Image: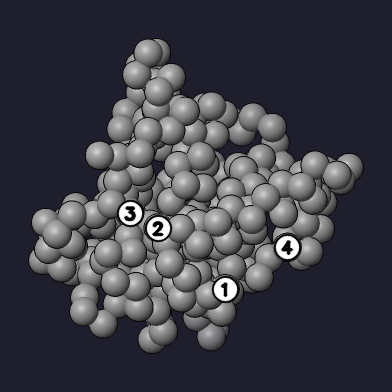
Amino acid sequence: MPRLSAGLVCGLLSATTWAAIQPLTAADCADLLANGVLSAANPVPCERLQRVSFSHLDWQGQQSTGQLIVLDAVAPQVESLMLALRAAKFPLQSAQPLTQFKGNDVLSMNANNSSAFNGRAVTAGQKWSKHAYGVAIDVNPVQNPYVSFADDGTAQILPAASAKAFLNRAELRADKPRRSGMVNEAVVHLFAQHGFMTWGGDWDSPIDYQHFEIGSRAFIEQLIALDPAAAQASFQHYADRYRQCAASQTGSLSEIRALCVAKVRQ
């Protein structure tokens, strides 16, 4: 049986907000393998992955259902994060596992699908992506594109549909962005409060506005080395430290986030 959160209990009564965590079944693991999302070489075995299902608002402001597959260590924080995004009325066009796209990240981005686990290498690289550990989340890729640069300075924008409408990030620090689904400073702070303290929008090359991850590979390896319960407790402590730091600071959200991420992130 899935573990019911407080949000799910309330959601059963109100039919508006809910979230739940489930372990993956053998059939789920077979499906990931069959669709190229998981391989025997993946750095995290399937039994360490969990499914976070949740309600979210769609583009029309209606309730929809999504799911993210993540490392068991981060699942409770992802559950709380999805409830927080729903409470903030931040919409997601789609949130479905990469099995729907045969593990093809570009197809998922083109469909404006928010996602987490995908047993793939980093884009244009050889080492494992943080997505292959289940500790990275991509949000609304069309509204929050990935921008890479060739040696001659030529930019490539993924998804291509983002090029004319969503490269202007002037609304990043706006409290209420006019363009629905764009990440702003309040959303970045929410992710950091739940342990996802690295945002690709802070990078110089590539710039990955949709991408959030938890920290260094050394920290990820520490979590994987622990049993699931201990790993969850360790990651909760990590997120708690950021929240405690942020609560004690004054200034803009961007200033608070920069200070506390520098202090806490591993």
Neighbourhood count class around disc 1 (C-alpha, 10 Å): few under 14, some 14–19, many 20 upward: some
Task: Give the residue pinned by disc 2.
Answer: 72
Distance CA(mark 2)–CA(mark 3): 5 Å
Q: Is residue 88 among what the camera can see?
A: yes
The colour mode here is one colour
Question: Circle 1 sits in a helix, a strand or a loop, which is it?
Answer: helix
Kindly identify the amino acid type of the residue bearing the numbered disc 3: Gln
Q: Which residue is mark 1?
A: 219
Upstream in sequence: badge 4 or badge 2: 2
What's the residue at 55%, 56% (across, down)?
A: 233
Q: Which residue is mark 3?
A: 50
Which quadrant of the rendered structure holds the N terminus?
top left
Q: Quadrant of residue 200?
A: bottom right
**Residue 154, how many percent across, how many down?**
51, 75
Q: Earlier in the sequence, mark 1 or mark 2?
A: 2
Q: Quadrant of the C terminus?
A: bottom right
- Decide which of 64, 25 is in the foreground and name it: 25
Check residue 264 in the rendering and tell me which mark sits there, or answer none. Answer: 4
- Numbered disc in front, either 4 or 2: 2
Q: Left or right of 176: which side holds 208?
A: left
- Residue 136 in sight: no
Asked where in the image residue 9 lies, by quadrant, the reply is: top left
Query: Left or right: where does residue 248 sit relative to residue 127?
Result: right
